Amino acid sequence: MQRPQRIRIKNESEKLQSLPEGKEYFQDLGGDGDILFLGLGPNPCQALELFSEEGKAHYIECPDFEKQIPTVRKISNKFTRINPEELDALPEKNFRLILYTPNKRLFPSFWEPIISKLALQKTAFFSKIKSKTVWIPGNDNSLLVPELSRAFAGADFTYRVIAPDAMQRDLLSLLNQERPEIIFSINFNGLDNSGETYFMLREAGVKVVVWMVDNPFHIISGIKSEYWKEVPMLVTDEWFVNPLKDLGAKKVNHLPLATDPEFFNPDVPEYTGLENRTVFAGRSSFPKKDTFFAGCSFSTQDEQAAIKAIANGIKPDFEWWAKRDELTSFWPGKNVRDTGFKTEQSGTIWRTQALDNAGTNLTIFGDKGWRELLTNADIRPPIDYFTVLPAIYAGAAITLNMTSPLLPNGLTQRNFDVWSAGGFLLTDYTPGLSIFPEDLVAECSFSKPKDLPALSDKFHANPRLRKALSKKWREIILKDHTYRNRVINILDFIN
């Protein structure tokens, strides 16, 4: 017996999706009173039959859904239509909510705000007075959470670190305990891919901001809903601002990384034995790289193209690869990861060549992957970011920085932390260094790995010059580039 053919329509990401039928595809969201169907599915008569003894029936439907449904779809006059804009005029109306569940995958940007509004109407949340509190999704060891927590506290905010899964699972309960002023998310941490969490917070009057400290297109590549375009976003690399706006992002601005001088300062206990060493501290690749880039390739031709570009003084960064790949769309979909993988592999070549040119007095603190890339280097185990790394920066003659080419104009924590700790940094050049004085950047940066030997020799031979430059850099960093400075920028961006 041949199975009946399901209707297929394009979802908001322009992907074809089947419309299943049956009671199992209608979810009871609770409530009392008349039924309010949040979408009727492909067969409205069936929806009515499934709940035929439940009193009066109302419904809301998505216009983009209706445009694609065959004209034979008939809606019984037993249904009363409610338009989304009418919901605010029905605050006292009690409904039992029935959701056609595929809607959350079909058109989440339409349905999630409606579901959020109706869910919050059933709580006492709006009686809560908004507190001067910021919630930061993560844990106490998550990326930038300690620094931002301290910086927001310095701006007279109470901060609360919320487990990301709790943000999604227990949001209504959390909101009934406290009504925060701001949710500050790193890389969309704590926000789900459909937008449910974001729209619930927005409906509750909570300001949500996302700071993308990695390649933004990698971060949003797993998001199928267009809701991310509604979220106010900050990026550490200014290169991404216009491409994100071109995709429809409504509010995007540049916010570089910074430092926390209470962690990174010259008063940390001394790390001995590095007085005449060049140091690099970092991973050979980012965690779960193989999983993230599953199915992506980097051919021999790609490798040779990257090596040739570097030899010609060009860093094959994300912009370079996007042009070479003729990448026409950064979103939706995961095609951007193919370009990202080539960029990441080029970054390994770039970092390895730089370290090969750093001289024989090089010490690396990092993972075992470096042993496969650098056969004769002094490689030591990874060290703790907050307790040991400041002492290494302060104690080394020179610290090296190589910026990931996934961020064409980006900077790293080293561009701030090393100077704050009283150390000395040599960094590869990116346009992101333009936030610093041009003359200092020219002194302490290199454009090609083969430039490193002469530059390193110059500063190893002149500790007095290193010390003088370090003092100038530290003054600039502490004045303009701490996380307290960045929190001021964040609050200006929100308001």
Image (cartoon, rainbow, N blue to C red):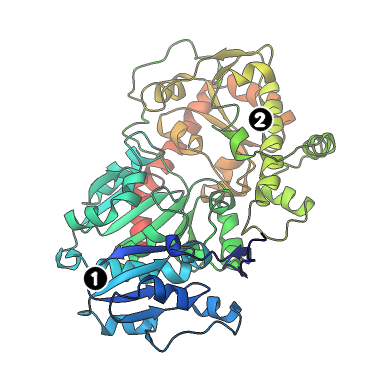
Considering the numbered disc 2 on the image, is that residue within a helix, a strand or a loop?
Answer: helix
Q: Report the amino acid beneath label 1.
A: Gln
Image quarter (top left, top right, bottom left or bottom right) of the N terminus: bottom right
Circle 1 residues within 10 Å: few <14, some 14–19, many ≥20:
some
Q: For the view shown, which residue lies furthest in the front direction?
A: 1
Q: Which residue is mark 1?
A: 121
Q: Position of residue 405 (x, y in %)?
A: 64, 42
Which quadrant holds the C terminus?
Answer: bottom left
Residue at the extreme bottom = 77
- Tell me the residue that label 2 is attached to: 351
> How many angstroms separate mark 1 from mark 2 (CA)?
54 Å
- Observer-nearest of 471 and 259: 259
Rendering quarter of residue 99: bottom left
Q: Is residue 425 above or below residue 67?
A: above
Residue at (77% x, 56% y) in the render: 326
Q: Position of residue 237 (x, y in %)?
A: 55, 51
Mark number displayed over residue 318: none
